[in-house]
């Protein structure tokens, strides 16, 4: 288990209070049927205005998944439905972890289970891939309740609360499931699969530096390489599993085959495609509260990952969700020319990079003559599109950065001499005495620009 620093008495008191509160709520929930709890949770979703900070996250995730043709009205309605299902699923999950096998079987309908049966017959073990979807605690009990003879295990993240963690661990192992901590080595899960065990992995999570960069719904992110890694070392079939609400307190669990154009190596790109299929079964049942495509505020131009970007050959021509960056360039044409090496490097640094330039209208021609793909925005227009996640000031002039601050309210990165005393404004510190071209390149590199550029590996 992960080593934890010793916590003070106040933190331990907080953990004890949280643990007692959980047990009290769990006991109270025991008096209600799972159908009543689902309806109760759906009604409580009306309190979602208390979690307004999560609305933009859910909306941004849904905008990526549903695509650019979805209207704001549709996204707003979908967001409300997501909160309704999420609240209902979370409340029923508190009871789902303690249901008897008979109650689990009455709450879940298994579909296309022959896919799992064929995988089991290969006698190489099975890797089950799921998303954070539906009544997740009930899903962990499902196979054990239907097929108690199967050897089933899962990867889980231990809770920080040392008093609550063993309780949750016991609940999840209620129907014989073995649990492996995500903070331990891969050896034990691999051995489990080699011994013809079934291993469940939640795949729709950011993996950071240890992950593989790949498109997920057309947007680059770092995903866990664990499913592909275990398959490589065991030959175990990979099966997807989705969970959809069919009525209050009732769910449909469907098994999905991983699609391969031909026999070959399974990669994280294949897992991402499988997760897209799983998620699309019921978008409103997915837990969208996690910011899947969150930007690293210290290195905003970087996609952290050990390998990639990986892409399926069949998706070669599919458009990517653009990573749009606004650059405030100098007004003077000669000074603008000094930023061109940095602009070129930025444009080439990652396949989803979408360059936007902000300058006076008289500089539009100079920008077009660079040959660098970009969208030009003139200061005189006084407005910018709403889909720009960050801005960078490649100029020494304080007036120019003030103009940027007036037009753009998102995170801005600039040299200390031109930094504004505003929220979301970050100073970029680089080596002093650099010539202008090298100076602007240094700014880009200090913000995580990929050097050398990221290049596709097609699988």
Image (spheres, rainbow, N blue to C red):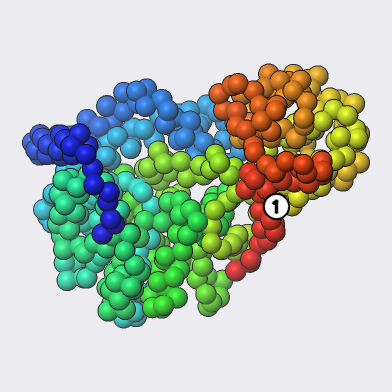
- 8 vs 309, left or right, is left
Hey, which residue is sitting farthest front in the picture? 433
Q: Nearer the viewer, residue 310 or 240?
A: 310
**Compared to 287, does 36 lie above or below?**
above
Q: Nearer the viewer, residue 439 or 370?
A: 439
Determine which quarter of the picture holds residue 89.
top left
Residue at x 40%, y 38% (from the top left corner): 289
- 158 vs 411, left or right, is left
Q: Position of residue 280 (x, y in %)?
A: 45, 49
Q: Is residue 155 visible?
A: no
Determine which quarter of the picture holds residue 324.
top right
Residue at x 68%, y 61% (from the top left corner): 455
Q: Secondary structure at mark 1?
A: loop
Q: Position of residue 359 (x, y in %)?
A: 81, 28
| Residue designated by label 1 | 349
Instruction: Locate the C terminus and report the quarter of the image it occupies.
Output: bottom right
Q: Position of residue 350 (x, y in %)?
A: 67, 52
Instruction: Locate the N terminus and report the quarter of the image it occupies.
Output: bottom left
Q: Nearer the viewer, residue 162 or 22?
A: 162
Determine which quarter of the picture holds residue 447.
top right
**Compared to 230, does 36 lie above or below?**
above
Residue at x 57%, y 35% (from the top left corner): 70
Q: Is residue 433 visible?
A: yes
Residue at x 42%, y 28% (from the top left corner): 53
- 45 vs 394, left or right, is left
Q: Nearer the viewer, residue 420 or 216?
A: 420
Q: Position of residue 153 (x, y in %)?
A: 25, 65
Label 1: few (<14), some (14–19) or many (≥20) C-alpha neighbours in 10 Å = many
**Compared to 54, does 341 lie above or below?**
below
């Amino acid at each position: 288990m992960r080593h934890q620093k010793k916590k003070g008495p106040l933190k331990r008191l907080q953990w004890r209070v949280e643990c007692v509160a959980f047990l009290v709520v769990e006991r109270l929930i025991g008096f209600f049927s799972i159908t009543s709890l689902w309806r109760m949770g759906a009604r409580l979703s009306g309190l979602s205005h208390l979690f307004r900070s999560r609305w933009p996250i859910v909306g941004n995730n849904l905008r990526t998944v549903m695509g650019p043709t979805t209207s704001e009205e549709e996204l707003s309605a979908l967001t409300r439905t997501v909160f309704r299902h999420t609240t209902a699923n979370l409340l029923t999950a508190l009871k789902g972890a303690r249901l008897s096998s008979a109650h689990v079987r009455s709450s879940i309908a298994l579909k296309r289970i022959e896919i799992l049966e064929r995988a089991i017959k290969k006698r190489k073990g099975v890797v089950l891939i799921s998303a954070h979807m539906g009544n997740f605690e009930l899903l962990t009990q499902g196979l054990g309740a239907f097929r108690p003879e199967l050897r089933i295990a899962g990867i889980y993240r231990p809770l920080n609360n040392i008093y609550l963690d063993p309780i949750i661990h016991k609940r999840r192992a209620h129907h014989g499931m073995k649990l492996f901590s995500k903070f331990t080595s891969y050896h034990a899960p691999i051995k489990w699969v080699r011994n013809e065990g079934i291993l469940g992995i939640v795949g729709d999570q950011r993996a950071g530096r240890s992950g593989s960069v790949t498109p997920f719904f057309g947007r680059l992110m770092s995903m866990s390489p664990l499913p592909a890694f275990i398959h490589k070392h065991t030959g175990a079939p990979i099966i997807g599993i989705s969970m959809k609400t069919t009525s209050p307190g009732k769910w449909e669990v469907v098994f999905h085959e991983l699609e391969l154009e031909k026999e070959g190596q399974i990669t994280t790109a294949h897992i991402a495609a499988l997760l897209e299929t799983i998620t699309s079964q019921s978008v409103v049942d997915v837990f969208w509260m996690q910011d899947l495509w969150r930007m690293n505020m210290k290195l905003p131009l970087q996609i952290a990952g050990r390998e990639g970007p990986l892409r399926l050959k069949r998706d070669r021509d599919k458009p990517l969700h653009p990573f749009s960056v606004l650059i405030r360039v100098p007004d003077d044409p000669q000074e603008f020319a000094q930023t061109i090496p940095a602009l070129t490097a930025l444009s080439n640094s990652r396949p989803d990079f979408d360059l936007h330039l902000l300058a006076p209208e008289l500089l539009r021609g100079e920008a077009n003559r660079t040959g660098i793909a970009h969208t030009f925005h003139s200061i005189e227009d006084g407005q910018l599109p709403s889909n720009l996640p960050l801005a960078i000031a490649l100029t020494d002039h304080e007036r120019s950065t003030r103009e940027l601050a007036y037009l753009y309210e998102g995170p801005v990165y600039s040299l200390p001499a031109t930094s504004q005393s505003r929220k979301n404004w970050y100073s970029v510190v680089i080596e002093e005495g650099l010539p202008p071209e090298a100076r602007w390149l240094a700014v880009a590199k200090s913000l995580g620009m990929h050097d050398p550029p990221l290049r596709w590996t097609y699988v």
